[in-house]
Image: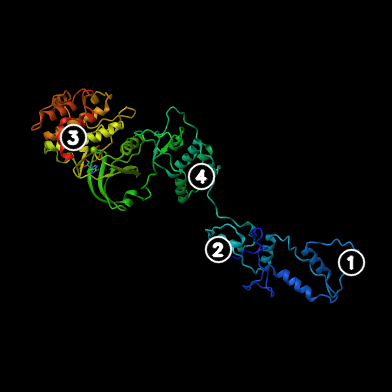
Amino acid sequence: MLRTKTPRPRGGKARRAAPGAASAVKPAKADGRSPSGELSLQLEHVSLTSLLSDRRPASGLTRFEVLLEEEESGCYRADPTPQPPRLPEPQSMPPPPPPPPISQASPVDADETMEEKDCCILSQDFFCTPDYITPEMPQVANEFDDDDKENIPCPKSPEKSANPRSKRYRTDCSPKAREVTDFSFDHQITPVLFDSLTRDDSEEEQPKQPALEKRGGYVSQSAVALRCRVMPPPCVKNPYLNTDPCIDAAVYGGRQCNSAVFSPSIGGNGLSRYRTDFHEIEKIGYGNFSVVFKVLNRIDGCLYAVKRSIKQLHNDMERRQAVKEVQAMAALGSHENIVRYFTSWFENEQLYIQMELCDRCLSMNRNQPVKRGEALELLYQICKGLDFMHERGIAHLDVKPDNIYVRNGIYKLGDFGCATLVNRSLAIEDGDSRYMPPEMLNDKYEHLDKVDIFSLGAAVYELIRGTPLPESGSHFTSIREGKIALLPGCPMQFQSLIKSMMDPDPVRRPSAKEILRHPSFDKLHKASSK
Ligand SMILES: Nc1ncnc2c1ncn2[C@@H]1O[C@H](COP(=O)(O)OP(=O)(O)OP(=O)(O)O)[C@@H](O)[C@H]1O
Ligand SMILES: [Mg+2]
């Protein structure tokens, strides 16, 4: 609030006082001065009365005093008694100036009267005016001293669009209106665009609003930031989740929205969310697409793994593919046997994924065979993770030792870069060919959940044998024909389970739920129930 008592510029426009403000002025003291010593508005009226009393004839009231009394008492006399014709006042007593019309004096008049006297400083409270922003440029304020006081230039405001934004946003929440606001956002912040994520291909492209297309002039950073807060970008539908019918379609940018904005691309202006939120400890791994760091969150003090895409994701296809991993993890939610997802963001056109930090992945000691008990445990736990996924209609499609993590003795499935929907409504991307079942190599995708079962069987087979699986050749083919070597030191029951998981026919492979009920794990259940 601006509360300083600022003398008004001479001849400048008077601020309008609130109704009743003039009458609220306290009566002046007998000496005609306010308690603070400033002359008050009342001075003129009080001093006028005292002036008249000095010149009062001994015989009684002057005619002017009679008029005053009549007016104050509210009964102006239309005197029924004949009055003598008006005579000019004697020279010794000149006619007093007409009194100011007290009851009709408008606050503006009073204000101006005071200004003429230049003796009164009025606070903003007195006038109940809104706050005024101190001019940004000092020269603007100085211009009040110039002669041309009525033509003081105002500081330039940003160019306005034809359609005032605030009003449109408040009153019109229709999908069409949202579309327009979203479009304007696109143009202001250069966000990462996902051109077809929310597009309904059956819709024809709508011509964009010409009034908004042409946007010239200066837009400040703070205005852009404010717009981001007031008009957030449209959401992107998570294909792994059934959309809640309560959510208005407009939230997703509307049916006619051609572009969806995931997030402003942070980093180009030096603001790195990664650097701001985390302290990088070390690089802990890398894959074909990502590099992974062990980091410390600066706020909660916990350790996490942050996975960053190696390439900058310039085109729409790459971004859509990258985001699928995040969406799958988010849709799955939390499960003990799935690497936990926390958050993700774009920075410098690279995708960052904050995840639970694991101790290691199973490929780290590939040449050392995994003991049978450990193999049993990991098979059971990863099957629990797969069962959880498959129940939600999601297939991993890249199960392999590289993507099985261990944390505090718990096995977890990670790297959801190939995850897809079992119902084949999403694009299908093959994982590592060493672990792929024959039907995937023949582009048959009817039983995508069973692809994961084959891959897990192949991964356990490899881990127990301690020799890497072939990438091609006769051994590669014979494995896909169901010809697998015996696993040394493993009971036949367990061997037959692995064999059934790697059956060439996906229909004959057991589901994750069926595997969990397999008698091979009875001992495990007994041990955990003790
Ligand atoms: N949550 C995690 N905790 C600990 N280490 C991790 C984690 N996630 C990934 N890593 C390490 O980073 C490596 C690469 O991770 P990831 O497999 O997810 O990347 P990618 O680029 O998707 O790999 P791929 O080539 O398998 O597709 C892993 O092999 C592992 O060593
Ligand atoms: Mg991986």
Q: Is residue 264 above or below residue 514?
A: below
Please rate how many residues cluster around mark 3, counting C-alpha atoms within 10 Å: few if below 14, some from 14 to 19, many from 20.
many
Ligand 2 visible in quadrant: top left
Q: Nearer the viewer, residue 212 or 361?
A: 361
Residue 499 placed where, x, y %?
15, 27
**How many other residues sit within 10 Å of disc 4, few (<14), some (14-19) or many (≥20)?**
few
The residue closer to the viewer here, 12 or 36, is: 36
Q: Badge 2 is on which residue?
A: 3
Task: Inspect the image, locate mark 3, and give the three-letter code of the amino acid beneath it.
Answer: Leu
Estimate the spatial distance between the alpha carbons at disc 3 and disc 1, rounded to whole Å.
121 Å
**Going 36% across and 35% down the picture, which residue do you hit?**
238
Front in this rendered view, residue 30 or 273: 30
List the residue tagged with mark 4.
216
Q: Position of residue 484 (x, y in %)?
A: 13, 26
Does ligand 1 reach within 8 Å of label 2's beta carbon?
A: no
Up-down relation of residue 68 to residue 277 (above or below): below
Q: Residue 86 — which label? A: 1
Does label 3 point to a residue whose CB lies under 8 Å from ligand 2? no
Q: Residue furthest left?
A: 489
Residue found 14% across the figure and 40% down from its top? 365
Label 4 SS: loop
Residue at 56% x, 59% y is 140
Mark 4 residue type? Gly
Residue 418 visible at all: no
To which residue does mark 3 refer? 379
Query: Which image quadrant is residue 111 in?
Result: bottom right
> 195 or 199, which lies in front?
199
Measured as percent of width and height from the top left, residue 496 is found at 14, 27
Q: Which mark is residue 298?
A: none
Disc 1 and disc 4: Cα gap in Å?
73 Å
Is 490 situated left or right of 19 in this image? left
Q: Which circle, 2 or 3, is nearer the viewer?
A: 3
